[in-house]
Image: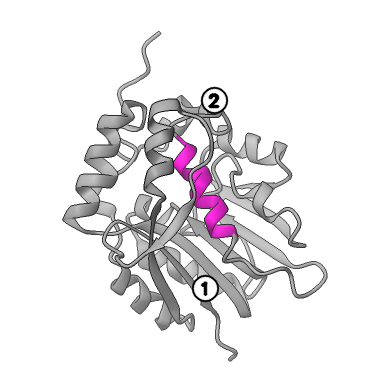
Amino acid sequence: MPLPRRTRNDPGQYDDLAGEWWRPGSPFSMLYWLARARARLIPPAERAGAILVDLGCGGGLLAPHVADKGYTHIGVDLVVSGLEQAAAHGIAPVLADVRRLPFADASADVVSAGEILEHVPDVPGVVAEACRILRPGGWLVLDTIADTALARLVAVRLAETVMPAVRGLHDPALLVDPQRLKVECARHGVPLKVRGVRPALPALARWLVTRRGAVPIVPTFSTAILYQGRGRKESQ
């Protein structure tokens, strides 16, 4: 049976691709590599009972990379098929919209927003919620796609040509300018530092041929395509 036709950025596409989250060589491999790189920005828990809230957790790809850091890992998503897989990997699943988080103020020690901001129409609202639930001294870590012509060419058009299964997952109109993101985070007491990242090119070339192995995500001088951010919430 053919898959239903979807509009760009339709969450239902993740149901269509539910079997791809953990399959070696899948179109979601880049998300796994990015999750591993994001985890390196998360310090070990500083207290017993520390909470990590994983916004847009999908199938739980961050889980194995933070399992030994001492957090209770809570995953938030709108896609039930992803949450079911996240739960199987040790994440406490919460079905919710990242624009209206069902958590108390200052309840999280870390908020991770990995590859989610480029999927939401209200980035300021999501940033406000992420910072609201973050306790003073807690960490916000994220990665997303820049709002540039180069990113639309490489991360959307070229990626969809090389991997047709991901066609339509991104709406180019929702990509996120890093400077605007820094301003929004600063408004809520989180000075965000950003840096560009990219896949290691020789390893990526091998993966495109073989669909085997992991590709390191490495820093780069430019934030014009992919970038990471990390900031610590100021004490009030």
Magenta run includes residue 40 = no
The crowd level at tag 2 (other Cα within 10 Å; few <14, some 14-19, many 20+) is some
Query: In the picture provided, is 157 more to the left or to the right than 50?
Result: left
Which is more N-terminal, label 2 or label 1? 2
Mark yes or no: residue 114 visible.
yes
Q: Residue at x 29, y 46 (%)?
A: 155
The answer to whether 60 is drawn above or below residue 150 in the figure is above
Mark yes or no: residue 101 visible.
no
Q: Which quarter shows the C terminus? A: bottom right
> Where in the figure is residue 182, as x and y percent of width and height?
37, 76
Could you tell me the amino acid type at mark 2? Gly
Q: Mark 1 — residue?
A: 131
Tell me the mark number nearer the camera, choosing from 1 and 2: 2
Q: Residue furthest top?
A: 1
Q: Mark 2 — residue?
A: 19
C-alpha gap between disc 1 and disc 2: 32 Å
Could you tell me the amino acid type at mark 1? Cys
Q: Residue at x 71, y 36 (%)?
A: 88
